[in-house]
């Protein structure tokens, strides 16, 4: 087919003109830049000590030798010890006599990333003076990982508080044969309840005081990528937390009690109930999930 020369030239020009296309990696770069920009403007006014100078206005180089690494660890331990002494010199008011035992738990693997997340979690729990015990539940560690983690906990984390603990559990990833790593959270917490807190043993004991203490204990389940900005307790009476609105209205008593657990709102609504429940619970036809009311679906289960 014959095409006029001018039209051919115009078509070639269009084909050769580059088009601007936004690729996913471009959007990701913009997002990261915005995040770092916001963090800079938010934290630049914080009371952060300046970096140590080498004399020429340069940052010190990272430790290269085992001796330098050991010195860095010692400096970190000394800093933590000093911070702990500050809290000892300025003790907070003691909790009331009826204040129940508190256990703040968080479930992790034994990866490097969750190791430093856990250290940050412990540090902020120390900084805000979180009451009670703080427990890292580590699942699926190799013997070497468990040895290294225990050593670090004893040499560094325990300097923050004797009430900071680490509890090791087996790997529950394949507990149902479907290789789901998030099984480690519920089964890890259960393992801790049974073997560390000894909940069932205390409840069934003949000691009334021990049974009451176990039944009234407050257990909080968080994630390692969280940081406490203030103490988290069972009492929200004077707190400014936003309470999810429902037809039932706000709770009359803003405390965690028997029959009244609390959770942060996880905005998936009744999503888990929109799938075929009869298929999901084909082997558990007596499951309470099959008889949940619409009100509970919207107001009781979207917690995470």
Image: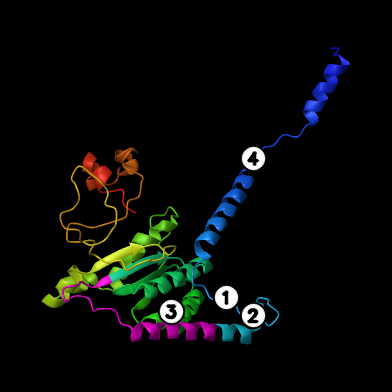
Residue appearing at x 42%, y 63% in the figure: 226
Kindly state the secondary structure of the residue where label 1 is placed.
loop
Label 2 or label 3, whichever comes before in sequence order: 2
Residue 196 seen by the camera: no
Foreground disc of the pair 1, 4: 1
The reply to whether the C-beta atoms of the residues labelled 1 and 4 are less than 8 Å apart is no
Could you give the CA–CA distance between mark 4 and mark 3, rounded to whole angstroms?
Answer: 46 Å
Residue 112 is situated, as x and y percent measured from the top left of the image, at: 53, 69
Label 1 or label 4, whichever comes before in sequence order: 4
Label 3 or label 1, whichever comes before in sequence order: 1
Residue at mark 1: 50
Q: Quadrant of residue 190?
A: bottom left
On the rendered image, what quadrant is the C terminus found in? bottom left
Q: Residues within 10 Å of mark 3 (few under 14, many from 20)?
A: many
Q: Residues within 10 Å of mark 4 (few under 14, many from 20)?
A: few
Label 2 or label 4, whichever comes before in sequence order: 4
* Range covered by the magenta-colored residues: 73-102
Residue at mark 3: 157
Could you give the CA–CA distance between mark 3 and mark 1, rounded to whole angstroms?
Answer: 24 Å
Could you give the CA–CA distance between mark 2 and mark 3, rounded to whole angstroms?
Answer: 27 Å
């Amino acid at each position: 087919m014959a095409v006029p020369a001018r039209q051919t030239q115009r078509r070639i020009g269009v084909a050769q003109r580059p088009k601007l296309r936004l690729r996913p990696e471009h959007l990701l770069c913009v997002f990261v830049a915005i995040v770092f920009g916001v963090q800079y403007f938010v934290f630049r006014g914080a009371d952060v000590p300046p970096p140590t100078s080498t004399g020429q206005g340069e940052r010190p180089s990272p430790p290269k030798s085992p001796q330098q690494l050991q010195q860095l660890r010692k400096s970190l331990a000394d800093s933590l010890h000093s911070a702990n002494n500050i809290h000892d010199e300025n003790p907070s008011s003691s909790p009331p006599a009826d204040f129940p035992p508190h256990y703040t738990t968080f479930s992790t693997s034994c990866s490097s990333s969750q190791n430093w997340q856990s250290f940050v979690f412990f540090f902020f729990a120390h900084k805000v003076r979180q009451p009670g015990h703080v427990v890292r539940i580590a699942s699926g560690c190799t013997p070497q990982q468990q040895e290294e983690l225990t050593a670090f906990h004893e040499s560094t984390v325990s300097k923050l508080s004797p009430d900071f603990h680490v509890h090791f559990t087996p790997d529950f990833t394949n507990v149902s044969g479907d290789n789901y790593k998030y099984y480690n959270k519920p089964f890890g917490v259960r393992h801790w309840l049974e073997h560390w807190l000894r909940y069932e043993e205390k409840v069934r004991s003949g000691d009334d005081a021990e049974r009451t203490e176990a039944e009234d204990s407050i257990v909080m389940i968080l994630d390692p990528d969280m940081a406490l900005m203030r103490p988290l307790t069972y009492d929200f009476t004077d707190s400014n937390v936003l309470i999810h609105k429902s037809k039932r209205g706000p709770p009359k008593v803003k405390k965690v009690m028997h029959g009244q657990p609390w959770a942060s709102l996880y905005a998936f609504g009744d999503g888990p109930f929109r799938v075929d429940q009869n298929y999901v619970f084909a082997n558990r036809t007596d499951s309470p999930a099959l008889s949940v009311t619409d009100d509970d679906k919207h107001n009781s289960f979207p917690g995470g």
